[in-house]
Amino acid sequence: MSQLKEAVLATTAQGDKAFVPYIMAGDGGLETLQPTILKLQELGVTAIEVGIPFTDPVADGPTIQAAGERALAEGTTLRKVIETLSSFADQITVPLVAMTYLNPILAYGTEKFAIDAKNAGIRGVIIPDMPLEERDIVHPALKNGGIDLVQLVSLTSTPERIERLTKASEGFIYAVTVNGITGARSSFQKDLAEHFKTIQTYTDTPVLAGFGISTSEQVKNFGSFCSGVIVGSKIVDSLAKNDWATIETLVKASKTALVK
C-alpha cells in the first residue's frame, strides 16, 4: 500500500476524517514553504497538497489564481519547489501531493521528476490538465518512483467514466464537489451524498471531497459521507493573512469529537 493511501486509511481507522490543506508554493516566497508545512503537520493534517504556480492554470478560482501570480512573481518554478522541499525533507512527516501541470513535468523530465520529487517528500501527484487517456505519459515513471497519480472525478462524469477514473486513481480519489472553479461556496447541490455513494461502489480507495469547502460545518458535513476533505482557497487566504486560528479550527473539525 502506498504511503499516501496508508496515511488516509490510518486517519479514518482512528475515527477521524482526512484533512488535506492546499497551499501555493512560493506565495510569500519559497522561504515560507518550510515553516508552513511544518506548522500544518504539527496541527495534525493527513497530507498536504502543494500547488505549483503555472501561467495557464485549470479550474483555479480568484484566490488561488492570485496566489499563483504572486508565486510566479517571486520566481517560483517546479524545480525550485523541489529543491526547497528537498532541503528539509528529513523534517517532513506527512505525505506531500504536488498539484502541477503536464508541461512543467515534461520540461523537467518525467524520470528525473519522479526521482527528485520522491526524495523531496512528494508521494502523490495531481495533473488536472492531463486526461485519463494520456496518463501513460507520466504514470510509468511515477510508479517506478513510488509516487501515486491521483485522479479527479467531476460531477459531470458518467458512471462509466467514474468507474474508469476510480479504478485508475492511486492514493485517494479527488471528488470535485462543484461544477466550476475553486473558491469558497455557501451551498452545494443537494444530491452530493448520492454522488459520493456511487463513486464508492467502484473502489475501496478513499474518496476525498474538494472544491468550495471553506467552513468547519462543511468539513463536518462532507466528512459524514466520505473519507475526508481537501480545503484550498480558505487555507490560501488564511495563510496570506497569517490567520492560523482559522486553519486550526478547520483541521479540528475533521477530528472525531467534532465530526459526530
Image (cartoon, rainbow, N blue to C red):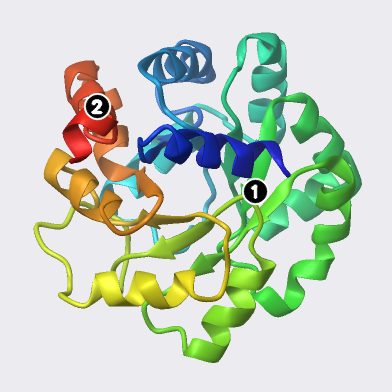
Give the quadrant of the N terminus: top right
Question: Are the residues at dot 2 and dot 1 in contact (C-beta closer than 8 Å)?
Answer: no
Q: Which residue lies furthest to the front in this view?
A: 14
| Amino acid marked by disc 2 | Lys
Foreground pick, 224 / 4: 224
Give the quadrant of the C terminus: top left
The quarter of the picture where residue 145 lies is top right
Residue sitting at x 72%, y 22%? 83
| Residue 26 image label | none
Residue, disc 2 = 252
Secondary structure at badge 1 equals strand
Assess disc 1: are there few (<14), some (14-19) or many (≥20) residues with their C-alpha within 10 Å of its C-alpha.
many
Residue sitting at x 65%, y 19%? 84
Residue sitting at x 86%, y 35%? 115
| Amino acid marked by disc 1 | Val
Residue 51 can be seen, yes or no: no
Assess disc 2: are there few (<14), some (14-19) or many (≥20) residues with their C-alpha within 10 Å of its C-alpha.
many
Mark 2 against mark 1, which lies toward the viewer?
2
User: As drawn, is 250 to the left or to the right of 43?
Assistant: left
Foreground pick, 201 / 236: 201
Residue 208: x percent and y percent? 42, 54
Residue 175: x percent and y percent? 42, 64
Relative to 86, say whether 78 is above or below.
below
Relative to 33, say whether 91 is above or below.
above
Residue 237 can be seen, yes or no: yes
Residue sitting at x 36%, y 55%? 210
Secondary structure at badge 2 equals helix
| Tally of numbered tags | 2
| N-term mark: 2 or 1 | 1
Relative to 19, say whether 141 is above or below.
below
| Residue 125 image label | 1
